[in-house]
């Protein structure tokens, strides 16, 4: 990953300068000046998302427009764009000229963006290494104050997010349940958290029947991954659960459209894995226990069927109405196991759970479900601060009828064309033992999509920074 070092001054400097500029009046007679370069305001005045390149002697000046005011997410995107799309202008010597006006959070956002700009979706294509990733490269920075800690944080945040991007964007014949469990074990060793992996035999013995039912049609063995980060003086105990369907065919209710993108159905799990890396890497003083139930929803003679009645770890029976409503079936065993065996004070689950939430909220924010007002407000505040937004949707008991079954305790799908995200959340709630501080995030619309950084839909790493920020703010 990119190494950074401070540069005392720019005397005799030759190379590339990254120069952020706040917007000025475009008819101003005062030019924008830095180092050797002077740019007339009518040519470049720092408008948001604009940039201007000036070559003077042995220096390439890249002026980067920030607009009049800017937020965390905008800064991150702006600098990711610069690193991603102007890499042909980067040589051995590159200096990031940090404006005196930048707060530590803005420095962190800019550095995160620069690191994220090295991510390349072409995992199996022959391509040149990004200049920033050369083993001998160090990105220098010039600042009027001590920003070293903010830079370190920015690097760690982006590093965890890139790991998450990799997990989601890599193909499903690479990222199967075993791949996720191996990743977790390795990350635990590297960053300092305990990892326990429960395979099919042990899961059967423990009674994780709902989880196992989903994976029984796949040749890839399910993996129930438990991660436990235990600092010496943990202030609070948080529990996380992430949906880890490494590929979703829909099962016997096979998908008729969009299956090509279903490698992303483990984006909730990937976000939890990335968050665990980041939480441990930042050495946050909170205990965090995370569970990733990982399996593949495939089709063969062993697949579970619509109208099957299956058992769950919590002891509740479930009528299977739709095998494509499988994510909630693995999540409930994860939630139940977490609550029974670890008793965390606050629980958050992340899942690409329903298309319904996309119909409701589009691609701009996640759906937030909780009856705990304080938890809701804190999650929203954390998301707003870094640009990973969410919006609350109801968990009213009037929706209970959507999961009522005549043959079993509950059914996994309402069968209605409305309120699908809500009925899915009500199903999860049924297995939380009325936990007073539980929140469900349906991230189907924000975990995987379109952006300027690739021609096809791709991962966003939504949730990694959000969960970490939320915990850190406690």
Image: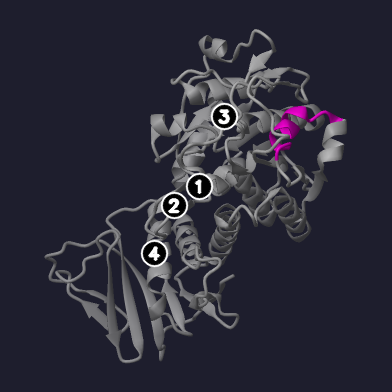
Q: Which residue is mark 2?
A: 457
Crowdedness of circle 1 by 10 Å Cα count: few (<14), some, many (20+)? some
Task: Name the quarter where the C terminus is drawn.
Answer: top right
Which label lies toward us, 2 or 3? 2
Which label lies toward us, 1 or 4? 1
The answer to which of 454 and 6 lies nearer the viewer is 454
Are discs 2 and 1 less than 8 Å apart at CB?
Answer: yes
Are discs 4 and 3 less than 8 Å apart at CB?
Answer: no
Secondary structure at numbered mark 3: helix
Magenta segment: 206-217
Q: Residue at x 78, y 30 (%)?
A: 208
Q: Which residue is mark 4?
A: 81
* The disc label shown at residue 375, or none: 3
Which label lies toward us, 4 or 3? 4
Earlier sequence position, callout 2 versus callout 3: 3
Q: Residue at x 43, y 69 (%)?
A: 83
């Amino acid at each position: 990953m990119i190494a950074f070092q401070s540069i005392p001054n720019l005397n005799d400097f030759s190379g590339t300068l990254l120069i952020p500029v706040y917007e000025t009046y475009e008819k101003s007679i005062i030019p924008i000046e830095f180092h050797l370069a002077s740019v007339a305001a009518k040519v470049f005045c720092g408008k948001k998302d604009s940039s201007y390149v000036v070559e003077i002697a042995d220096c390439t000046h890249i002026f980067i427009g920030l607009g009049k005011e800017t937020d965390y997410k905008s800064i991150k995107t702006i600098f990711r764009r610069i690193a991603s799309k102007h890499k042909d202008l980067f040589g051995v010597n590159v200096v990031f000229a940090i404006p005196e006006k930048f707060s530590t959070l803005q420095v962190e956002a800019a550095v995160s963006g620069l690191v994220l700009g090295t991510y390349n979706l072409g995992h199996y294509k022959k391509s040149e290494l990004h200049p920033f990733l050369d083993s001998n490269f160090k990105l220098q920075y010039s600042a009027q104050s001590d920003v070293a800690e903010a830079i370190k944080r920015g690097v760690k945040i982006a590093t965890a997010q890139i790991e998450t991007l990799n997990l989601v964007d890599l193909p499903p014949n690479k990222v199967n349940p075993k791949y996720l469990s191996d990743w977790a074990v390795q990350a635990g060793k590297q960053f300092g958290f305990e990892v326990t992996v429960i395979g099919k035999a042990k899961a059967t013995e423990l009674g994780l029947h709902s989880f196992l039912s989903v994976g029984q049609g796949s040749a890839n063995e399910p993996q129930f991954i438990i991660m436990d980060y235990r600092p010496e003086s943990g202030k609070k105990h948080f529990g996380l659960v992430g949906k880890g369907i490494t590929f979703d065919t829909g099962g016997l209710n096979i998908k008729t459209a969009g299956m090509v993108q279903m490698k992303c159905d483990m984006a909730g799990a990937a976000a939890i894995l990335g968050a665990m890396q980041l939480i441990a890497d930042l050495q946050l003083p909170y205990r965090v226990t995370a569970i990733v139930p990982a399996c593949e929803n495939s089709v063969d003679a062993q697949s579970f069927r619509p109208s099957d009645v299956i058992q769950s770890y919590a002891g509740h029976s479930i009528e299977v109405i739709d095998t494509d409503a499988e994510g909630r079936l693995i999540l409930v065993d994860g939630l139940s196991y977490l609550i029974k065996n670890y008793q965390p004070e606050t629980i958050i689950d992340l899942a690409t759970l329903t298309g319904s939430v996309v119909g409701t909220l589009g691609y701009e924010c996640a759906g937030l479900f909780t009856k705990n007002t304080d938890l809701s407000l804190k999650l929203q505040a954390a998301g707003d601060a870094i640009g990973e937004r969410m919006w609350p949707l109801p968990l009213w008991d009037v929706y209970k009828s959507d999961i009522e079954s005549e043959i079993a305790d509950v059914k996994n799908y309402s069968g209605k064309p409305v309120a699908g995200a809500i009925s899915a959340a009500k199903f999860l709630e049924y297995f939380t033992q009325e936990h007073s501080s539980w929140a469900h995030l349906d991230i189907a619309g924000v975990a995987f999509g379109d952006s300027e950084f690739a021609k096809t839909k791709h991962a966003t790493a939504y949730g990694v920074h959000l969960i970490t920020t939320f915990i850190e703010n406690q």
